[in-house]
Image (cartoon, rainbow, N blue to C red):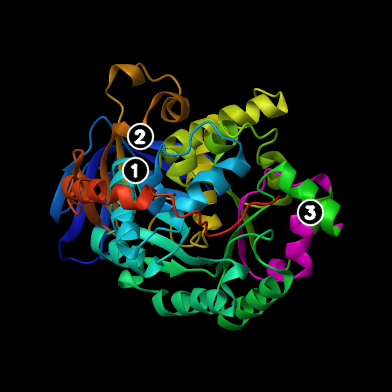
Amino acid sequence: MTDSPADLVITGCTVLVHDDQERVGFEENATIVVRDGVIESVTTSPESPPAAEHLDARGQVALPGLVNCHTHAPMVALRGVAEDLPTEEWFNDVVWPIESNLTARDVELGARLACAEMIRAGVTCFADHYFSMDTVASVVEECGMRAHLGEAYFSSQGPQGREKSLEFALGHRGAAGGRITTALAPHAPYTVADDDLAATAALAREHGLPVHLHAAENRDQTQTSLERHGVTPIEVLARSGILDADVLIAHGTGILDRDLPVLAGASGRVAVATAPRGYLKFAWPTTTPLRALHDLGIPVGLATDGAASNNSLDVWESMALTALVQKSTTGDPRWLTARQALHHATLQSARAVGLGDTLGTLAPGRRADIVLVDLTGPHTQPVHDLAATLVHSARSSDVRTTIVDGRILMRDRELLTLDVAEVVRELGERMPALLDRGHGKRIQDYDT
């Protein structure tokens, strides 16, 4: 330790910790010392060392900042415009026609609103897969969040789509003082041809970049792939070389038993992101097979997908829903305990976005991405099982303070880095042009 004052000291909180077996536990009346964006110590010492800023967190729980492992942040602009529709109509009749109108300014405003929503919900990092991502990167830099960003592309764009995805990934990795990491972002096996996937895999290996894409999103996609090509979407990823790179697979509710040895045999690091609210809303018959993936040692991070399908970017809700849906689909009330859900929300989510060595646990040497949760409300009292209280009783609105890299982005529910009212005003003015579907165009066809 150095003699100079720390940047931030948080006192009096209960801290979520991981033991050497990665089991979740809690330390009461703890003190967290932060210096240069890094956690210097987590102790139960009653002494509070000198610091530029002190936070009294009595009655609050300190958690690692939540990670939204798969979203389309700017799609908050489409929240509620495509309701109560099957997947195919949702894409073809509403979302993809509207997205053909998108401008960089729409994306920027959507990203601002999304970041404000996530900061207020205790999300400190998000993995985004969308268009005009350079504008999203600038918003991330400005608002202080951490992000894992990829410029999405379809094969229908021609080679320039893939090239633009690479250009973005190389140009922005390490940006925002290291808070931005990047990925190549082909949309999905059903919109990106095998040769494009193979070229992407080669670029990923050449440049040391991960790949973030949708695959086996639902059982219908898997069935259609089998009927048309004789292989599952996961098998497509294997034969195209995508599984030889580090890959983050969004959703995977269509993963079959035959896919499990394929995933187990991947030479790259495989992770999956689950966003259960959307699966329920689309009435998909299956969900992400967490138990099978767990048995393979594949991390499953929590996600929301975009707000056009999910209606919110609330990872707290994803945590509770993941636990409940897993209990329901396995028929086992013992599977996905509250502590297991917290593990998915913390270390597993950090690993899913390739940041498992720097985020996901509040320990010395980790980046200081911290949220403080107030459990003094009537809906979280009394506390008999702190893990259960956090997962099943607390809400994202109980997050009082959000910190990224040691910088306070929200203090006592007040956002410090974004002006929501101005964003909402301008976004409202832009809505008529954005929502116009009279042109009859769409950016892509959903045919699976």
Query: In the image, which residues are magenta?
Result: 230-257
Query: Reading the chain from its start, which is encountered first: label 2 or label 1?
Result: 1
Residue type pointed to by label 1 = Gly
User: CA separation, marks 2 and 1?
Assistant: 7 Å
In the image, is residue 252 part of the stretch drawn in magenta? Answer: yes
| Label 1: which secondary element | loop
Q: Position of residue 116 (x, y in %)?
A: 28, 47
Displayed quadrant of residue 209: bottom right
Residue type pointed to by label 2 = Ser
Residue ID for mark 3: 225
Residue type pointed to by label 3 = Ser
Q: Nearer the viewer, residue 1 or 389?
A: 389
Residue ID for mark 1: 122
Mark 3–mark 1 CB contact (< 8 Å): no
Going 54% across and 37% down the picture, which residue do you hit? 278
Of the two numbered discs 2 and 3 in the rendering, the one whose residue sits closer to the viewer = 3
